Amino acid sequence: MTLRYVFNVRFRLETASGVRTEPREFETTVSVTPPEPGASGWMLFRDALWRGEVNDPVYACELASSWVDVPVVSCEFAELRTTEESLDELRDAIAESLDEFNATSVRDVLHKYFGSAIHVEPGDATDR
């Protein structure tokens, strides 16, 4: 399955005493490949997103900081980037675990967590 969660992250450089950087904060785009369905952490979207936005800014910054290994000041969800085939696989995985999402359909789950922030690309999204 080819899924990439894309976040806009702002981070701060920590410097030694007497050292200064300009700028001190930077912005970057971070793409995260989630584990396969069934593996620990595959429901990152359920735990971190709501209607296409991070549901807890503090938690999102902690997650992002663990990904980039620097102090993160802000983290915003941009989109789920995927292929149609991988989106179908995600739909199947969600359908198998529907009771864990407190929803009545796969469509409801996708909307509840991703809002309209799903970007379907042609072909293999890992080539991008």
Image (cartoon, rainbow, N blue to C red):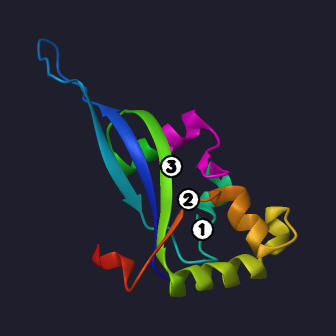
The residue singled out by tag 3 in the image is 77
Q: Residue 15 has which mark?
A: none
- Residue 95 vertical position relative to residue 28 in the rendered view, above or below: below
Q: Earlier in the sequence, mark 2 or mark 3?
A: 3
3D distance between C-alphas at marks 2 and 3: 9 Å
Of the residues tagged 2 and 3, which is closer to the observer? 2
Query: Mark 1 and mark 3 in contact (Cβ < 8 Å)?
Result: no
Q: Residue at x 45, y 79 (%)?
A: 2
Give, as a three-letter code, the residue at label 1. Ser
Measuring from the top left, give residue 19's x and y in whole percent.
11, 17
The residue singled out by tag 2 in the image is 117
Count residues near mark 1 (Cα–Cα under 10 Å), then give few for <14, some for 14-19, many for 20+.
few
3D distance between C-alphas at marks 1 and 2: 23 Å
3D distance between C-alphas at marks 3 and 1: 21 Å
The residues colored magenta run 49-63
The residue singled out by tag 1 in the image is 40
Is residue 54 inside the magenta stretch? yes
Give, as a three-letter code, the residue at label 3. Phe
Measuring from the top left, give residue 39's x and y in whole percent.
59, 74
- Residue 52 vertical position relative to residue 37 in the rendered view, above or below: above
Quadrant of the rendered image containing residue 99: bottom right
SS category of the residue bearing label 1: loop
Query: Mark 2 and mark 1 in contact (Cβ < 8 Å)?
Result: no
- Residue 51 vertical position relative to residue 71 in the rendered view, above or below: below
Q: Residue at x 56, y 33 (%)?
A: 58
Residue 62 seen anywhere in this rendered image of the structure:
no
Instruction: Give the camera-side residue of 69 and 119.
Output: 119
Count residues near mark 2 (Cα–Cα under 10 Å), then give few for <14, some for 14-19, many for 20+.
some
SS category of the residue bearing label 3: strand
